[in-house]
Amino acid sequence: MGPFSLPDAASILSPRPYIGKERVFHEPTEHGRWWLTMPRRPNTPCKHPGCGRLVPYGEAYCEEHRPLHAHDTKTTTEKGYGRRWQKARTAFLHAHPLCARCQTKGQLVKATVVDHIIPHRGDPELFWDTDNWQPLCKRCHDQKTMTEDRYQEFRY
Ligand SMILES: [Zn+2]
Ligand SMILES: [Zn+2]
């Protein structure tokens, strides 16, 4: 490698160290790239009202209160199509990073929403048809939802 080696995709996408549950991703050093065992994070208080018992970093509730909150520790990605949709939309926005509507007006705006061109209203075929997807910025999406869809965005 020459003196001007390009940063790889990971360091472009995550300018700050990526902190996973167990590992910290550090900037490349002269020795290469390192995954290090995450330094111990301080414990955090249980979120149950009035409890405050210290629990390991990353846990929301103590042993006693965790069962009471089982429903809200489940993220949307763990429900139904959530995970598949999250992956699909992330990949789509990577491939189509610019808002399609703004682009027709000659504006380059980062897309943050995958919009269904024909509102799918819960129809899985329309929902998963990538020909029916377009990248939009939040503003254009909100505008479209207000003027065209007239129905609440269906969410998985
Ligand atoms: Zn507690
Ligand atoms: Zn836009």
Image: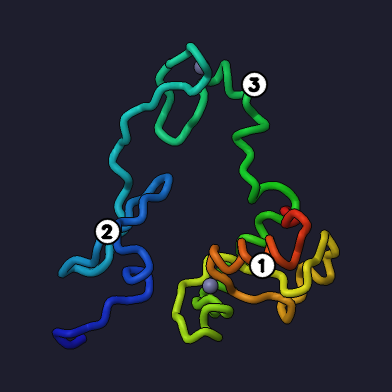
- Residue at 75% x, 64% y is 149
Residue corresponding to mark 1 = 144
Alpha carbon separation for disc pair 3 and 2: 37 Å
The N terminus - image quarter: bottom left
Going from N to C along the chain, the mark reached first, 1 or 2, is 2
Q: Is residue 25 visible?
A: yes
In what element is the residue under mark 1? Answer: helix
**Compared with residue 82, is residue 90 higher up or lower down, i.e. above or below?**
below
Q: Identify the image quadrant of residue 116.
A: bottom right
- Mark 1 neighbour class, 10 Å CA radius: few under 14, some 14 to 19, many 20 or more: some
How many angstroms separate mark 3 from mark 1 (CA)? 40 Å
State the residue position of label 3. Answer: 68
Decide which of 88, 7 is in the foreground and name it. Answer: 88
Task: Say what amino acid the circle numbered 3 marks.
Answer: Leu
Residue positioned 63% across, 39% down in the render: 74
In the image, 98 versus 2, the foreground residue is: 98
**Disc 1 to disc 2, how far (Cα)?**
41 Å
Residue 114 in percent (x, y) is at 62, 68
The amino acid at mark 2 is His
Q: Point out the frontmost of discs 1 and 2.
A: 1
Label 3 crowd bin: few (<14), some (14–19), many (20+), radius 10 Å: few
Task: Please tell me how crowded label 2 is: few (under 14), some (14-19), or many (20+) other residues with Cα within 10 Å.
Answer: some
